[in-house]
Image: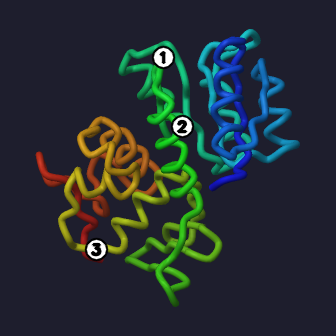
Amino acid sequence: MSGARVLIVDDEPEIIRALRSILAGHGYEPIVATTAAEGLELLDRRRPDVVLLDLILPDGSGLDVTRAIREERKLDVPIIVLSAHGEERTKIEALDLGADDYLTKPFGVGELLARMRASLRRAGGGRPSGQAAIEHGDLRMDLERREVTVAGRSVHLTPKEYAMLQYLLTHVGKLVTHTALLREVWGPEYADARPYLHVFVGQLRRKLEPDPSKPRYILTEPGVGYRLADA
C-alpha cells in the first residue's frame, strides 16, 4: 500500500497540512483539492487510490461529491469521509451514498491510517486461488473483472458492498455473525460497529433483491448475524 495516491478534499489549512505530513511520512502520495469541483477534476485526472473527503466545502457538500463519484462516474475508489459532524443520520447518509468509512474530527493518526489500510486492502480484492467466478442462483460474481450480475443484470457495488457479498458467497448457507463480517470487511477494530452492517446490508438488498422488504438472498438471523440463503 506504500505509494498509494490519496486525494484529500478539504478546505481547512490546518487539516491539509497535517494530512499531507502524515501521509507523506507513511509513504503515501497526497494530492490536495480545496473545493468540490477541484476534487472531482483531480479525481478524473489523477485517479487516486483512496479519497479523504470533508463534508462541508466552499462550493458544495461532500455528500454531492460522493454521489458524483458513485452514481455519475460509477467509480469504486474507496471514500473515507472526514467531518466534524458526528450525528448518526449524517454518517448513515454518507454511507448510503457510497462512502466506505467515516471519521469524526478530531481523529487519531493511528485510526486514520488503519482505516485507510483496510479500505485499500478491500478495494484490492483478491480472489480464491483458481476460482474465476462465484455463482449462486441468479447471482454471479466475476472475480477476475470484479463484476456482479443478478439474472444477467449488471449491478454496481461499492468496494465494501462487494467485499461483504464475496464473504457471504463463500459461506453460503452458513450463519455469519456480525463480528465475523465486521472483522472480515472492515477489520478487527470494527468488531462492535454494528450500525455499519445495517446500512450496508440494506444497500446490498436494494441492489440485489427483487423485493428488499422480503429478502430471499441475504437473510437476517436476529441478534446474531446474516445468512446467504441456499439457492
- What separation in Å lies between label 1 and label 2 (alpha carbons)? 19 Å
Q: Which residue is mark 2?
A: 99
Give whichever of 142, 47 is nearer the camera: 47
**Does residue 102 sit above or below 74 in this rendering?**
above
Q: Nearer the viewer, mark 2 or mark 3?
A: 2
| Residue plotted at (46% across, 26% down) | 108
Mark 2 crowd level (few <14, some 14–19, many ≥20, 10 Å Cα): many
The answer to which quarter of the image holds residue 22 is top right
| Disc 1 residue type (three-letter) | Pro
Q: Position of residue 47 (x, y in %)?
A: 79, 47
| Residue plotted at (49% across, 17% down) | 105
Mark 3 crowd level (few <14, some 14–19, many ≥20, 10 Å Cα): some
Q: Which residue is mark 3?
A: 172
Give whichever of 153, 80 is nearer the camera: 80
The answer to which quarter of the image holds residue 80 is top right
Question: Label 2 near label 1: C-beta < 8 Å?
Answer: no
- From the viewer's perspective, tell me whether residue 187 is left or right of residue 5: left
Considering every residue shown, the one lying at the far bottom of the view is 130
Q: Which numbered disc covers residue 106?
A: 1
Task: Give the secondary structure at mark 3.
Answer: loop
| Disc 2 residue type (three-letter) | Ala
Q: Position of residue 150 (x, y in %)?
A: 49, 67
**Does residue 8 sit above or below 87 in this rendering?**
below
Q: Nearer the viewer, mark 1 or mark 2?
A: 1
- What separation in Å lies between label 2 and label 3 (alpha carbons)? 27 Å
Question: Label 1 near label 3: C-beta < 8 Å?
Answer: no
Q: Position of residue 182 (x, y in %)?
A: 31, 50
**Does residue 150 sit above or below 123 in this rendering?**
below
| Residue plotted at (55% across, 24% down) | 82
Task: Give the secondary structure at mark 2.
Answer: loop
| Residue plotted at (83% across, 25% down) | 38
Lower position in the chain sequence, tag 1 or tag 2: 2
